[in-house]
Amino acid sequence: MDYKTAHNLILEQGNALNARTNSDAFLSRLEQGKPPIPGQVTSILLALKILFDSLKEEPAFEQQLTAALYQLAMESHRQFILGRDRGVEWPPLLREDLNRISLAIKNIFSGQWQELT
């Protein structure tokens, strides 16, 4: 995966407006109480690592990417909790996957990579 592909994937998966029009977008699936598509979290994590490698020396990020990263980190957890409260039975490792996504985004913002455990 190259930077452009990673960038576009994060914009698509982490943009709340896109999530409402693309029912298979990561945030959209969580909002619907559906688990991610197999491989979706892996693709997001790979894209985040590529973004980190490409942006670690950048002093500022484009606004649209920053918004998508923020929404991906925050909205995914919010939808997880809302779904759980509605009785959705999430996959057993989804919470850990969401934590990995949040840590990867924190890494991008901090400029220092911490291993995702």
Image (cartoon, rainbow, N blue to C red):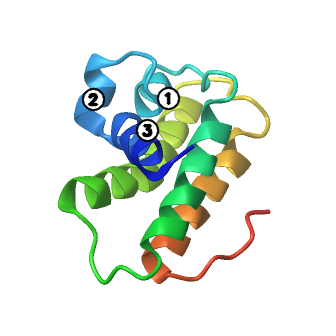
Estimate the spatial distance between the alpha carbons at disc 1 and disc 2, rounded to whole Å: 13 Å
Give the amino acid at mark 3: Leu
Any mark on residue 15, and which? none
Residue 73 x %, y %: 46, 55
Q: Residue at x 77, y 40 (%)?
A: 93
Question: Relative to 65, does residue 38 appear above or below in the rendering?
Answer: above
Give the secondary structure at mark 1: helix
Estimate the spatial distance between the alpha carbons at disc 2 and disc 3, rounded to whole Å: 11 Å
Of the residues under marks 1 and 2, which one precedes in the sequence?
A: 2
Give the secondary structure at mark 3: helix
Of the residues under marks 1 and 3, which one precedes in the sequence?
A: 3
10 Å neighbourhood of mark 3: few (<14), some, or many (≥20)? Answer: some
Residue 14 x %, y %: 38, 42
Work out whether residue 72 or residue 77 is closer to the camera in this orientation and state it.
72
Work out whether residue 54 or residue 21 is closer to the camera in this orientation and state it.
54
Q: Nearer the viewer, mark 1 or mark 2?
A: 2
Give the amino acid at mark 2: Asn
Work out whether residue 82 or residue 56 is closer to the camera in this orientation and state it.
56
Position of 103 compared to 74: left or right?
right
Position of 17 compared to 115: left or right?
left
Residue receiving disc 2: 18
Q: Residue at x 53, y 42 (%)?
A: 81
Residue receiving disc 1: 30
Estimate the spatial distance between the alpha carbons at disc 1 and disc 3, rounded to whole Å: 17 Å
Quarter the C terminus occupies: bottom right
Of the residues under marks 2 and 3, which one precedes in the sequence?
A: 3
Residue receiving disc 3: 9
